């Protein structure tokens, strides 16, 4: 803001948290790369009127003295063109002015022509040989109010992603011009300055807070503190607001003058985290003082001159921080190779450092990854220049050398879509993620960690209430907290076995209990969970020498989309037993027909399943020492354990839900407790509240994790019926459930879980949440217009929000994909889209068939991991359908080679 200008306070805003529907589908451009060849900084204010623009002007002038190219960028300006921060910075640092197309709409043609003339002069070299100099305003409104209010009154809105993408594009253009100057033998270093509007948490044009909408750019922050009374609080609060959103804040500056000692107090509180630089106060001009056209008065000119050494130091510190940051990123892959032991990785087969993804941050559903430069040939010369201290004029030794070192290391930051949802954990959108962080931070500050046995706390109670009212509604009465999915399974096995022993009079012994499960199942890596599955690569002798498969593991029928229709494939022995009737009822025109379990009960296929399951249980009973009509002491099936509908680690296999429903019904008759492993499938991963909802039957025990905290923290919960809980009652502690963890029910995780479950069910924030009273937001409407591929879940017949998601994957694309020559079958359900490849090898987890496809996805900006011969995409329950379509199109392209 120009010195002396006053922003009038507008009317009270009606702004609230911005809903997903307020942004058009085409307002989500790709961000593109974020260059690291030159230093860049984002200037934030701890309040209005603290001097952001004055500090930006001094910073730009210091860069000029150091011989650096300079880009000053104002993403959003109000009060324009009378008020122009870019004009003041340009006047102070000798930068030509420019405006983006949006801001240019407010300028007269004569002024635009003058800007173009200034830029032409600068480009010709008269402003400094080879220098790239520019002071630019991207978006602007006339009203001198907050940007969101200006949009409300004037219109001409801009979405968050569009604004961030345009800033990134300007940074790329600047970096390219500077790099071009370097290759031409002229000045090759630069510094980019992005100045925000208002305070750290002031709304941007859309109403989103600026500290949220600019986070994706990953620009180190220079926070302008407040030297006035109350400024210590304002500055430290602003610092916390930035860091809690992942911003790096290495430098804090403020006009202090030593009067109140704010700088010293702030430095004490930020010791070891940020460096605080104190500047003299800049006095306002006397009444009637002459002001230059750019807004420079004599008082400001004197302040800039007196503060020049301090600004030179600021530039040097910012350049040094940038060089250190780039060096750390460049070295990360090599250090990882020498120090880390990755899970599920054969380290000897990992390629060079380029094969390691260095993740600098997360931005919504994307990783922010470091891409090293194509060549480091200039690194030795740059290092020598830095060591020599390279001068820039103006008393800033080392600035040019540090910038050259960063340019040599260079590289960029790029967004890579997290298509495996970080091992199936990610659950909320970019807009909702700050809510999770706030919940975790508040719980950490309030509780830290506290002991749980015979104690309680609000987050644990509230999360239990939400669990029992959602995934546990109608059947569960108790919640047992553990640390992760595998330990939740260990607890579930203990619960189910105790219930079986209590029901069958086996509490004093007399039988070895086993599980009934399915082949290709996976329930975790702890020893008990390993024993509860059939032999697999995960529990072979090289992995788990203690493994003993403790159970009967049935080969189930699976379903997939093939050539545009859903087909159920029966196991070979079941098909042989069925004879000519094996194909009856195994082909479905839509996914809804396949998932319509209730309608399929009583069908010939249902009777086939029932007879087959009963026969296999009878055979197992006889082989276990029984005979005749029941199981005798020896080995007994004490629990059924299933991953409802979709097996994850087993290859994203969709098990015919009718088969699983039949299996549960048969076990109910035999009084075998039922465990649902919903670690992966719970909380809308499959498009419904739980996998149990798709089967239309409830378990005795169920396990939840992964999406439980929205993907932020490890936490799991095992839910149980009242009857299961009663099986542990008794006079002796030895009858209790003797299981626990040091961090059982940790308040941070529980509080985050409460926030995550609320966000997932928030129809205002989640564009996929079925809301029949909103046009286009009901599943039955969407499926009626869809194709066979579906990609959702069971059909919706609700009249109010029912806990299901709309179909997320385009049915026509899925149908076409299922006919691709490289594809054996497609499974799309809820947030998951898995493609089994027509592999030339034996297939399965050891297959290398998907490796080439995932490599092509990586090159297209999509991070995935192969699952044997299966390549899969996984989005969040809150992902917009446009994003689903975009990542699916990249998968199709990767399959095409």
Image (cartoon, rainbow, N blue to C red):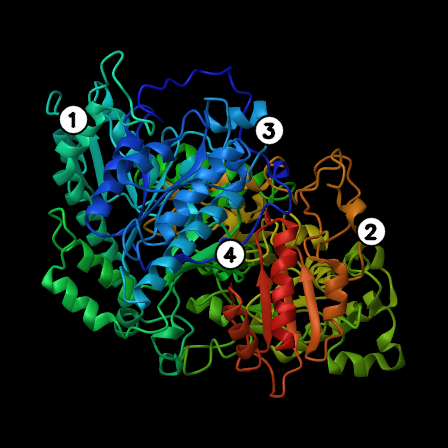
Q: Secondary structure at mark 3?
A: loop
Mark 4: give few (<14), some (14-19) or many (20+) Cα within 10 Å. many
Cα distance between the residues tagged 1 and 2: 64 Å
| Viewer-side label of 1, 3 | 3
Q: Nearer the viewer, mark 2 or mark 3?
A: 3
- The circle on residue 256 is 1
Q: Is residue 308 left or right of residue 700?
A: left
x and y, in percent, of residue 487 in the image: 44, 58
As displayed, is residue 742 above or below residue 838? Answer: above
Give the distance between the C-alpha atoms of the residues marked 4 and 1, in whole angstroms: 61 Å
Q: Quadrant of the image for the N terminus?
A: top left
Helix, strand or loop status at disc 2: loop
Q: Position of residue 61 (x, y in %)?
A: 24, 41
Quarter in which the C terminus is drawn: bottom right
Q: Residue at x 73, y 61 (%)?
A: 657
- How much space separates mark 1 and mark 3, taking CA atoms? 39 Å
Where residue 671 sits: x, y (%)? 66, 58
- Secondary structure under the numbered disc 1 in the rendered image: loop
Q: Which mark is residue 785?
A: 2
For the residues labelled 2 and 3, the Cα–Cα distance comes to: 34 Å
Q: Are marks 1 and 3 in contact (CB under 8 Å)?
A: no
- Mark 1 Cα within 10 Å, few/some/many (few <14, many 20+)? many
Q: Which residue is mark 4?
A: 492
């Amino acid at each position: 803001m120009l010195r002396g200008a006053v922003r009038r306070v507008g009317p009270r805003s009606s702004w609230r948290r911005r809903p997903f529907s307020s942004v058009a589908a085409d307002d989500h451009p790709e961000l593109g790369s974020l260059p690291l060849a030159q230093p860049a900084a984002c200037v934030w204010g701890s309040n209005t009127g603290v001097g952001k623009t004055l500090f930006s002007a001094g910073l730009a002038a210091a860069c000029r003295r150091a011989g650096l190219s300079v880009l000053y960028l104002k993403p959003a300006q109000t009060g324009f063109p009378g008020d122009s921060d870019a004009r003041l910075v340009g006047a102070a640092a000798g930068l030509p002015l420019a405006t983006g197309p949006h801001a240019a709409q407010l300028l007269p043609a004569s002024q635009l022509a003058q800007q173009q003339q200034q830029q032409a002069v600068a480009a010709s070299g008269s402003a400094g040989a080879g220098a790239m100099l520019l002071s630019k305003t991207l978006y602007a409104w006339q009203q001198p109010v907050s940007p969101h209010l200006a949009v409300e009154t004037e219109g001409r809105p801009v979405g968050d992603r569009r604004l961030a993408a345009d800033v990134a594009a300007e940074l790329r253009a600047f970096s390219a011009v500077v790099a071009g100057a370097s290759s031409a033998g002229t000045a090759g270093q630069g510094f980019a300055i992005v100045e925000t509007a208002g305070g750290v948490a002031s709304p941007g044009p859309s109403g989103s807070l600026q500290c949220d909408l600019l986070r994706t750019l990953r620009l180190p922050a220079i926070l302008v503190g407040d030297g006035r009374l109350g400024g210590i609080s304002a500055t430290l609060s602003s610092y916390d607001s930035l860091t809690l959103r992942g911003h790096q804040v290495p430098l804090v500056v403020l006009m202090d003058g030593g009067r109140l000692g704010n700088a010293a107090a702030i430095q004490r509180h930020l010791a070891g985290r940020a460096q605080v630089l104190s500047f003299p106060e800049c006095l306002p001009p006397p009444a009637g003082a002459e002001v230059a056209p750019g807004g420079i008065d004599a008082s400001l000119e004197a302040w800039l001159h007196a503060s020049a050494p301090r600004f030179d130091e600021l530039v040097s510190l910012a350049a040094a921080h940038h060089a250190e940051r780039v060096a750390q990123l460049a070295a990360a892959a090599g250090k990882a190779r020498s120090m880390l032991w990755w899970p599920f990785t054969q380290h000897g087969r990992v390629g060079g450092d380029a094969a390691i993804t260095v993740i600098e941050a997360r931005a919504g559903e994307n990783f922010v990854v470091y891409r090293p430069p194509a060549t480091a040939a200039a690194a030795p010369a740059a290092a020598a220049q830095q060591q020599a201290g390279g001068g820039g004029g103006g008393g800033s030794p080392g600035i040019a050398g540090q910038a050259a070192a960063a340019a040599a290391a260079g590289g960029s930051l790029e967004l890579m879509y997290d298509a495996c949802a970080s091992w199936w954990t990610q659950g909320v959108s970019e807009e909702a993620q700050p809510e999770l962080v706030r919940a975790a931070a508040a719980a950490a500050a309030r509780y830290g960690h506290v002991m749980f046995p015979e104690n309680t706390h609000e987050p644990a109670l509230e999360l239990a209430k939400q669990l029992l009212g959602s995934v546990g509604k109608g059947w569960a009465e108790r919640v047992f907290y553990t640390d992760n999915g595998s330990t939740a399974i260990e607890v579930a096995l203990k619960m189910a076995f105790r219930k079986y022993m209590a029901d069958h009079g086996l509490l004093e012994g007399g039988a070895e209990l086993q599980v009934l499960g399915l082949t290709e199942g996976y329930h975790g890596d702890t020893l008990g969970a390993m024993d509860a599955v059939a032999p697999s690569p995960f529990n072979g002798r090289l992995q788990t020498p203690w493994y003993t498969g403790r159970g009967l593991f049935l080969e189930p029928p699976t379903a997939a989309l093939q050539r545009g229709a859903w087909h159920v494939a029966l196991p070979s022995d079941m098909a042989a037993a069925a004879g000519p009737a094996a194909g009856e009822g195994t082909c479905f025109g839509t996914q809804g027909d396949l998932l319509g379990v209730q309608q399929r009960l009583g069908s010939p296929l249902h009777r086939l399943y029932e007879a087959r399951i009963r026969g296999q249980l009878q055979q197992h009973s006889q082989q276990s020492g029984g005979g005749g009509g029941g199981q005798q002491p020896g080995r007994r099936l004490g629990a059924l354990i299933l991953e409802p509908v979709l097996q994850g680690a087993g290859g994203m296999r969709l098990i015919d839900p009718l088969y699983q429903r039949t299996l549960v019904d048969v076990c109910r008759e035999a009084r075998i407790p039922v465990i649902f492993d919903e670690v992966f499938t719970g909380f809308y991963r499959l498009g419904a509240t739980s996998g149990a909802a798709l089967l239309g039957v409830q378990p005795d025990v169920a396990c939840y994790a992964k999406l439980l905290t929205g993907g932020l923290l490890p936490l799991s919960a095992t839910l149980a019926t009242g009857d299961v809980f009663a099986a542990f009652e008794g006079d002796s502690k030895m009858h209790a459930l003797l299981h626990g963890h040091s961090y059982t029910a940790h308040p941070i995780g529980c509080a985050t879980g409460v926030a995550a479950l609320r966000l997932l069910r928030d129809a205002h924030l989640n564009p996929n949440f079925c809301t029949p009273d909103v046009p286009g937001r009901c599943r039955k409407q969407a499926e009626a217009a869809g194709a066979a591929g579906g990609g959702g879940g069971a059909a919706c017949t609700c009249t109010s929000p029912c806990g299901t998601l709309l179909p997320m994957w385009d049915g026509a694309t899925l149908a076409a994909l299922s006919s691709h020559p490289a594809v054996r079958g497609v499974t799309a359900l809820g947030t998951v889209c898995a493609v089994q490849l027509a592999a030339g090898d034996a297939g399965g987890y050891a297959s290398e068939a998907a490796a080439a496809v995932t490599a092509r996805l990586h090159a297209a900006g999509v991070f995935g991991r192969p699952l044997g011969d299966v390549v899969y995409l996984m989005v969040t329950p809150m992902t917009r359908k446009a994003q689903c379509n975009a990542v699916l199109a990249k998968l199709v392209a990767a399959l095409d080679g």
